[in-house]
Amino acid sequence: MRLNDKPMRGAGGKSRHQLFEELDRPAMKPLPEEPYTFAEWQIGVRVGQDYHVRWSEQYYSVPHTLVGVKVNVKATTVSVSVFHRDRRVALHARRHEPGYVGTLSEHQPKAHQRYAQYDAAAIFAWAEAAGGAVAQFLQRHIEHHRRPALSLQAGRGLQRLSRDYGTERLQAACQRALQMHARAVSSVASILRRQLDQAPVNAPLPETPLPAHDQVRGADYYTH
């Protein structure tokens, strides 16, 4: 303390304490209300068609009007924030479960809000009525993708296939898809187009021959 109060000839006889009060203290700003928290950033992340962005192995929603737009994502140990044009457009509590999907209802279009409230139950009821394999396939889709909008599209896709091919064939096709460990509705549609649903479930799938090409030697090459 005596050193701080000691007058200094090079400072016009003022002490360090006096200079601090005159120069430094007026320029000081209050400390932040919250302590500094380390954050990671991802710049230029494009918003998916289901209005979610990915951080690590989790997905977080943003306003659906930002589909296809590039945003910046900031993650701390406790939160995930999304910014568009320097304005925060989404704030989520950070989760660490692989495949977690955080969807805020205010980010959803009206149609998806109605789906969340009513259509999900209706689609599951339809799948259960269509047959066990159909319901099991849809459940596998939900558990694997953990993306509500994608599973909504999948359920509607199965309903279209039911209208086009009939419920009985769709049931058989889903059973074949489960045997193949397929998770995409396009796989079910391919099974129906190729009429593989009408083959016994335990029968081997037909092999698709390789196209002819000069670089493909074939089995005969190795018999010489």
Image: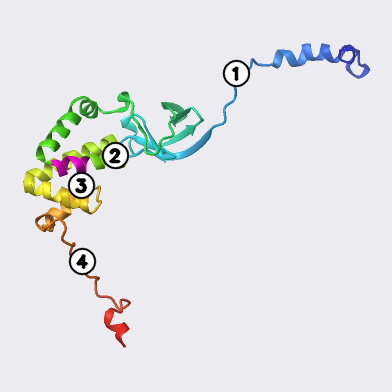
Q: Quadrant of residue 139?
A: top left
In the rendered image, the residue lying farthest to the front is 202
Residue where numbered disc 2 is placed: 143
Quadrant of the frame with the N terminus:
top right
Q: Earlier in the sequence, mark 1 or mark 3?
A: 1
Residue where numbered disc 1 is placed: 32
4 and 3 marks in contact (CB < 8 Å): no
Q: Quadrant of residue 7?
A: top right
Q: Position of residue 189 (x, y in %)?
A: 16, 51
2 and 4 marks in contact (CB < 8 Å): no
4 and 1 marks in contact (CB < 8 Å): no
- Colour scheme: rainbow
Is residue 84 visible in this depiction of the protein?
A: no
Is residue 207 visible in this depiction of the protein?
A: yes
User: In 3D space, how far apart are the residues under numbered discs 4 and 1 (Cα atoms)?
Assistant: 66 Å
Q: Earlier in the sequence, mark 2 or mark 3?
A: 2
Q: Earlier in the sequence, mark 4 or mark 1?
A: 1
Mark 3: which amino acid? Val
Q: Main secondary structure of the magenta part?
A: helix
Labelled disc at residue 183: none
Mark 2: which amino acid? Glu
Labelled disc at residue 185: 3
Q: Earlier in the sequence, mark 4 or mark 3?
A: 3
The region drawn magenta spans 132-138
Residue where numbered disc 4 is placed: 207
Q: Earlier in the sequence, mark 1 or mark 2?
A: 1
